[in-house]
Amino acid sequence: MALAAATLSFAVSATAQNSNSSYFMEGAVNRHMVNPAFAPQQGYVAMPALGNFNIDLSTNFNIGDMLFQRNGKTVTFLHPDVTKAEALGGLEDVNKFRTDINLQILGVGFRAFGGYNTITVSSRTFAGFKLPYDLFSIAKDLENRSYHVSDASVFGQSFAEVALGHSRQITEDLRLGAKLKVLVGIARVKAELSDLDLNLTADQEWTATAHATVEANMKGLKITEKSKDYKQTDTNGNTRTYTTIDDFKTDDFKPIGGMGFAVDLGGEYDFKELVPGLKASLAILDLGFINWAESHTVANHGDPFTFNGFSNIQVKDGSGEKFSDQTDRLVDDITDLYRLENKGDQGSNSYGIGTTLNVGVEYALPWYDKVRVGLLSSSRFQENYGWNEERLSANYAPCHWFDMNVNGAIGTFGPSFGWMLNLHPVGFNLYLAMDRTLGKVSKQFAPMNKGTQFSMGINFPLQSARKKIW
């Protein structure tokens, strides 16, 4: 669990997957990322490492409902000065968080071989959690009653991707495209708490029975253990030595933990003979897998034990104790709650990386073709972390070197308002986009609503968009 939490915290600070606001933006050089059949108006070379990036946080609860101001400091819901009603009032029955990452390190698009071609090198990371309300209640609430928690999970994965794409006009109305991706696995962590039963037997002392498993796919990972005594609730009241996880050591970490392949497939059809200005498109992204060389597993047997509860932490360093020490203590509390034992390396395993389906329809206004209206349906298939949204956008291209749109969506993480601005004269491209417009932020610049998504890109087009090159 500690390793999964570390993966999650890394991803929160990373850059995220492509903006859906760009799907119908013909002047966007990176729209081949959302459908490999799309051929941007311009070939391009991306600025290395900074060319195309997003920051994406998605939740079904308000992040601000878990952060509070006390005595001039920002604290978490676990702080003793935060009441139970304040701490738990904004949470859902099932609380979901996810961030999906795609940082393009190198990118180029050009016309050759009878179509449009792309070469990209990217670093990708996904992290998320799915936590029921009762787990937060356990952490905050110490009432004299029983608790049952099920179906909690934390997940993270990171890998590098080299993608080769090609799209071409098959007929006058049909365009198809595909990408072949070589995947280099870096790390993958999956923690699942299938069920947890707690009973209060004394002041701040819990009798607990838990079933949990953590699988870590990482080359060179070392798991250290420690021994603890705990009360076993059998008829004799025996006490025995119990071995549990102490730490996950990455001193011998190897950057290549696995290898795999994936494909993107896409198509676009122009219904101009039937309805002038009407187009439909379809794309399947990230259809593939990674074979991981090592699969380190820790789990428990569901034995009953005593647990003394959680300690409060603050968001930033306070007097007397560093924030890092507080978070380490919280991780120790979680590890003690699960009582995980090392099962060793279970050998190689193969897992999918999560697949996205995009279905789009757009219509250019017959009396003013500079305005196009588009409807995009996106669905992500990824076990506990899948999502879907329907996004309606209005796209406006007043001249050959500038276009923009505004859009709105409804989906798994609630309603959102988005926009995109795209400047692409000869030799330079700058775009800014938000699928979920940023609202109120904390002093640490954390979004206080249901997440946000921001995209920015700097690229160097190879020719003017004035020319119809495809």
Image: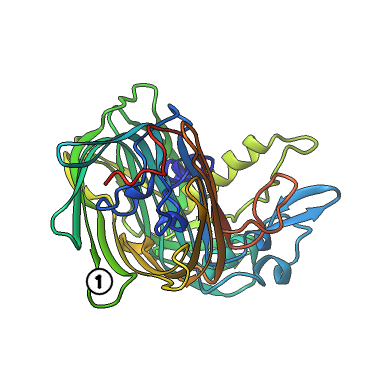
Picture layout, residue 59 above or below residue 403: below
Q: Residue furthest top?
A: 252
Confirm whether residue 92 shows in the render.
yes
Picture layout, residue 406 above or below residue 226: below
Name the one closer to the observer, 88 or 345: 88
Looking at the rendered structure, the kind of residue marked 1 is: Phe
Q: Quadrant of residue 79?
A: bottom right
Name the one closer to the observer, 210 or 297: 297
Mark 1 burial class by Cα count in 10 Å: few <14, some 14-19, many 20+: some
User: Residue 434: x percent and y percent?
Assistant: 55, 54
User: Residue 371: x percent and y percent?
Assistant: 48, 65
Name the one closer to the observer, 169 or 257: 169
Residue occupied by mark 1 = 271
Q: Residue furthest right?
A: 71
Name the one closer to the observer, 131 or 329: 131
Q: Which residue lies at the image location 26% right of the left edge and 28% below the top edge?
A: 256
**233 left or right of 9?**
left
**319 left or right of 464?**
right
Q: Residue furthest bottom?
A: 274
